[in-house]
Amino acid sequence: MPALPTKLPNTGTTIFSVMSALAAEHGAVNLGQGFPDFGADPALLQAVTDAMAAGHNQYPPMTGVPALRQAIAAKLNGLYGAAYDADRDITITAGGTQGLITALHSCVEAGDEVIIIEPAYDSYDPAIRL
């Protein structure tokens, strides 16, 4: 099978892969990245089950479910006394890394300078280089 070309040939192994292997080798609790030692709240699991059974299982609008964006805007407005607009100021992403990559790809052009303060999360550099 031919190898697929890559835009990031020098990325290499991440620190999270190294730490996960060490934790497994020594039977340690992995505090490296997203390995909770507890399950999801049963109420959350039931809410997800109920929502899917009710047919709420389609892709949302690109910026996120309007009711969620409105609730976040209301929460921020209450916390900070600012006027956040759910339609203009709030975007839901599938996680922090995806949000960061989306923001970088929206704002950074080839040749722009981006400063990374180290130590840094290992996805920052590849996200910028893409």
Image (cartoon, rainbow, N blue to C red):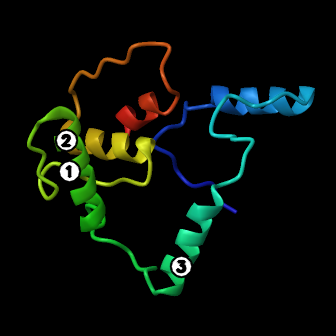
* Near-viewer residue (43 or 128): 43
**Helix, strand or loop at mark 1:** helix
* Image location of residue 43, percent across then percent down: 59, 63
Q: Residue at the location (63% across, 30% down)?
A: 14
Between tags 2 and 3, which lies in front?
Answer: 2
Q: Residue at the location (49% across, 33% down)?
A: 123
Is residue 105 shown above or below 39?
above
Q: Residue at the location (44% across, 48% down)?
A: 95
Q: Label 2 amino acid?
A: Gly
Examine the rendering and report whether any part of residue 13 can be seen. Answer: no
Q: Look at mark 1 in the image and give the residue it sits on.
A: 74
* Near-viewer residue (8 or 88): 88
**Helix, strand or loop at mark 2:** helix
On residue 78, the disc is 2
Q: Look at mark 3 in the image and give the residue it sits on.
A: 50
Whether residues under marks 2 and 1 lie with C-beta atoms below 8 angstroms apart, the answer is yes
